[in-house]
Image (cartoon, rainbow, N blue to C red):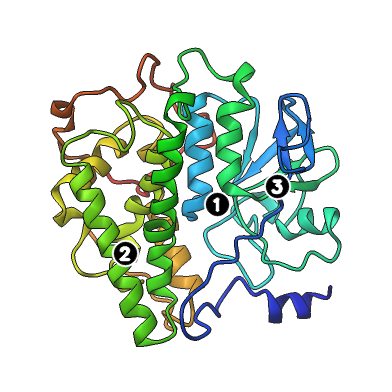
């Protein structure tokens, strides 16, 4: 497929509002990385777990990619799966490694993530998304199926988890985690996009109602329990957190999700701060890159591409008082250590 065709038909910059209700393309490369390289239960091609073989490409700006960075850090997989980080903006073809020296990923040697997709699928017909896992020896993309990536980190890479790694997807809670995740994805994670990319007043009004119904449900649920499922952090908390971290900075204004701010919802705001102040969460959040991505890339929503100066982010570090609800962040486990050298959020980009 030519670059021109890719740009016109599968643009990842500029043209997001196409009329009516926004519908997310959820068809991803479904390959799995499994402990023995076996295929997935539905016949998904399998690749073997192998330390040092794969590179996780995950832009700081993207909430779907942010999940994989958090889970990788919580489980202590930093020295097993390397991390490539594209910049916060991209052109119509792909995320680019413009923050790296020479504009190339230092391990993969590519300027655009698109190159890894084309090495595997020369006529790849869809948008190039993060997170993506790339096979370093071949330079080919393995998968960009973001919901499965974090589950596999928890269940297939257990041999390489750090001592004290938390159980993010414990078997006895999986059914409830899956139920919560389904509603959070459809109504909140994707719900903010459904508001922001609505192409008609009717579509926006319906999306807005659905979003706030779900946020009110979460506010009530989290008023009496510290975490979404069980007494410690699980996959469900990771998935909700990355949307909450972007809510006041981006979704409230840019996506018109403006009934009220997150900071005006006591339980959700306390919950979000609790997680933010937990090692592995807030230390992955780059508010500068987040705002640059949404306000610059979404040209049809923000044609001036002006990035707002606000909001004040200091509230993220204020006491949350959630300890009174019981539970502990890592269950029987321990917090992760310091952020790996070279992966720190840049000074002034966090909530200081």
In front: 51, or 41? Answer: 41
Can the viewer see residue 312? no
Q: Which mark is residue 59?
A: 1
- On the image, numbered disc 2 is attached to which residue? 211
Please rate how many residues cluster around mark 3, counting C-alpha atoms within 10 Å: few if below 14, some from 14 to 19, many from 20: many
Q: Earlier in the sequence, mark 2 or mark 1?
A: 1
Q: Residue at x 46, y 41 (%)?
A: 178
Image location (x, y in percent) of residue 288: 39, 56
Quarter of the rendering occupied by the C terminus: top left
In front: 175, or 339? Answer: 175
Q: Which mark is residue 143?
A: 3
Image location (x, y in percent) of residue 1: 84, 73
Q: Which mark is residue 46?
A: none
Q: Are marks 3 and 2 in contact (CB under 8 Å)?
A: no
Please rate how many residues cluster around mark 1, counting C-alpha atoms within 10 Å: few if below 14, some from 14 to 19, many from 20: many
Q: Earlier in the sequence, mark 3 or mark 2?
A: 3
Cα separation between marks 2 and 1: 25 Å
Image location (x, y in percent) of residue 264: 14, 56
Q: Earlier in the sequence, mark 3 or mark 1?
A: 1
Image location (x, y in percent) of residue 276: 31, 39
Can the viewer see residue 197? yes
259 over 247 or under it: above or below: below
Foreground mark, 3 or 1, reads: 3
Please rate how many residues cluster around mark 2, counting C-alpha atoms within 10 Å: few if below 14, some from 14 to 19, many from 20: many
What kind of element bears circle 2? Answer: helix
Cα separation between marks 3 and 1: 15 Å
Cα separation between marks 3 and 2: 29 Å
């Amino acid at each position: 497929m030519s670059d021109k065709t890719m740009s016109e038909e599968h643009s990842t910059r500029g043209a997001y509002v196409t009329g009516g209700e926004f519908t997310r393309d959820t068809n991803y490369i479904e390959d799995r990385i499994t402990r023995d390289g076996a295929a997935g239960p539905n016949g998904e091609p399998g690749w073997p777990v192998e330390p040092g073989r794969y590179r996780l490409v995950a832009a700081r700006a993207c909430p779907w990619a942010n999940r994989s960075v958090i889970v990788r850090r919580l489980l202590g997989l930093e020295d097993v799966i390397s991390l490539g980080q594209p910049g916060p903006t991209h052109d119509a073809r792909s995320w680019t490694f413009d923050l790296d020296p020479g504009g190339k990923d230092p391990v993969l040697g590519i300027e655009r993530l698109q190159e890894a997709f084309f090495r595997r699928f020369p006529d790849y017909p869809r948008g190039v998304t993060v997170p993506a896992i790339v096979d370093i020896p071949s330079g080919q993309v393995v998968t960009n199926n973001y919901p499965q990536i974090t589950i596999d980190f928890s269940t297939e890479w257990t041999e390489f988890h750090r001592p004290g790694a938390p159980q993010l997807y414990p078997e006895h809670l999986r059914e409830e985690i899956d139920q919560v995740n389904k509603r959070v994805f459809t109504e909140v994670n994707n719900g903010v996009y459904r508001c922001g990319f609505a192409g008609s007043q009717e579509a926006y009004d319906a999306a807005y109602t659905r979003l706030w119904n779900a946020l009110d449900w979460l506010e009530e649920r989290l008023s009496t329990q510290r975490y979404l499922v069980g007494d410690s952090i699980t996959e469900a908390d990771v998935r909700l957190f990355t949307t909450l971290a972007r809510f006041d900075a981006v979704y409230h204004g840019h996506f018109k999700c403006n009934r009220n701010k997150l900071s005006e919802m006591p339980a959700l705001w306390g919950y979000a701060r609790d997680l933010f102040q937990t090692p592995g969460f807030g230390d992955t959040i780059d508010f500068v890159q987040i705002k640059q991505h949404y306000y610059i890339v979404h040209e049809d929503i923000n044609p001036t591409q002006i990035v707002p100066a606000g909001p004040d982010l200091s509230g993220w570090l204020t006491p949350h008082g959630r300890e009174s609800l019981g539970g502990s962040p890592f269950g029987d486990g321990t917090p992760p250590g310091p952020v790996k050298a070279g992966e720190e959020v840049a000074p002034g980009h966090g909530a200081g």
